[in-house]
Amino acid sequence: MKYITLDTNAWVYLANGAEPAKLLDFLVKEITAGNITLLLPETICSEWNAKKVRTVQQGGLKHYNDAAAAVDNLKKVFGNKADQSPFNFLIDESKNYENFLQFCESFKKIKPELEAAISRNIKTIEELFRHPCAKILPITTTLKLKAADYAVAKKAPFHTKNSFSDALILFSFLDYVKTQNIEDGIFISCNITDYSKSKAEPKEIHPDLEADFVATKSKYFVYIGEAFKTIQDDIISLWEMKMIEDVREHDVTSHEMHFCEVCLEAHDRYNEIFFQEIVDLLDERININDESGDSYRQNIWSPFYNKLKIGYCEYCNTEHFLCAKCGCINSIEDYNYNEEIECNGGCGLTYIVENESIPFEYEDKSYRIIVRKEKCAICDNEFVDTGGGLNTCPRCEDEMNNR
């Protein structure tokens, strides 16, 4: 019996085709046969649910869209075969040109197949998560304290950035194989920044984590194919491994990706949003008072926010922001400026992005979380909406509760 944990990014690679589909098929076969027990930290389940559409599905199709755009540009360069283009010497015979056009058309027909394959892989992975041979590993207080100790000491995986979720994934795996006296457990992660010794030696575990792996006799892999090769030697060839390494080197889904909904709806394009700017955010809820002049119940509002992450679409340049509370993406088209924007994530925050210049400019803007007011269904007075979904003011609520 083999006990294996795949990090979230490893599942992403299995789903989007960065690792061969046969590796996912092999995993399904071995788990079904009872030869592999899947150790699944709770953190991975929550991360997968957050990434399976944005990072897996949309990120995988971005590869196709970029290639399709390149093919279209190539057609424009060649032009019509009758045109006197300086590039026409590249195509000596009309037959070759016709073959090129056929290739362009057939390439565009691949997209539905890619979408179906990615959706199929996502479904397969989620079925594995629910399989009887998948052991869900809870995140205990002890593991959180261990992660906190490593964070304070800036030990891996905290040596380059705040990696609390990554630490919990690894520590839950190590804790389980240790308490269950399991030897030769396999931990697979493509996240060499957090776990590996260095970029020069990515397949070696970081020295800060080495003792735990030695104590449990566990193995660390950065490529799924290499890990599975220890179970079945002919599962993957050296040539295929080289191809995987090349794909990984140029992969665009190795980081958290955000896509422009405006482009998706208007142009059926998956264009990435780059969040590289942090602006000041005024949270007006801090100073809210109720009608009696007393300070409003701030425990309802807390925490407050003073920074907002801003990004722009690489294609249409539409502005977006990540909600300070829930992290949901919200677009700001021209008609959204100076208007209330209720967060798409349903967290209850309402924003206003003030931009007084016409036409709208990007330099002189202000960002605010505003307070929404509603009319009480009982007394008809205005009251501050806390986002709780109630349609009665606090005073009427208190009176009803005291009856």
Image: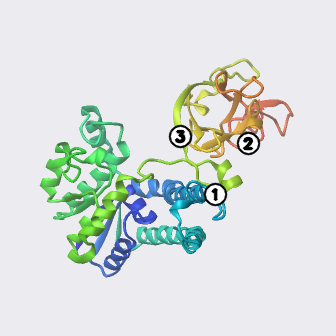
The residue lying furthest to the bottom in this view is 33
Q: Position of residue 66 (x, y in %)?
A: 53, 55
Disc 1 from disc 3: Cα separation? 40 Å
Q: Which of the labelled discs sits on residue 172, or is there none?
A: none
Residue at position x 23%, y 50% in the image = 202
Marks 2/3 in contact by CB < 8 Å: the verdict is no
Q: In this figure, what is the number of numbered marks? A: 3
Closest to the observer: 365 or 182? 365
Q: Position of residue 19 (x, y in %)?
A: 37, 65
Question: Can you identify the residue that label 2 sits on?
Answer: 390
Q: Position of residue 305 (x, y in %)?
A: 56, 28
Mark 1 surroundings: few (<14), some (14-19) or many (≥20) residues within 10 A: few
Mark 3 surroundings: few (<14), some (14-19) or many (≥20) residues within 10 A: some
Closest to the observer: 73 or 128? 73
Above or below for 208 versus 174: above
Q: Position of residue 290 (x, y in %)?
A: 73, 23
Badge 1 element: loop
Q: Is residue 3 left or right of residue 249?
A: left
Mark 1 or mark 2: which is in front? 1
Question: Can you identify the residue that label 3 sits on?
Answer: 274
Residue at position x 68%, y 54% in the image = 267
Question: Can you identify the residue that label 1 sits on?
Answer: 84
Examine the rendering and report whether any part of residue 323 can be seen: no
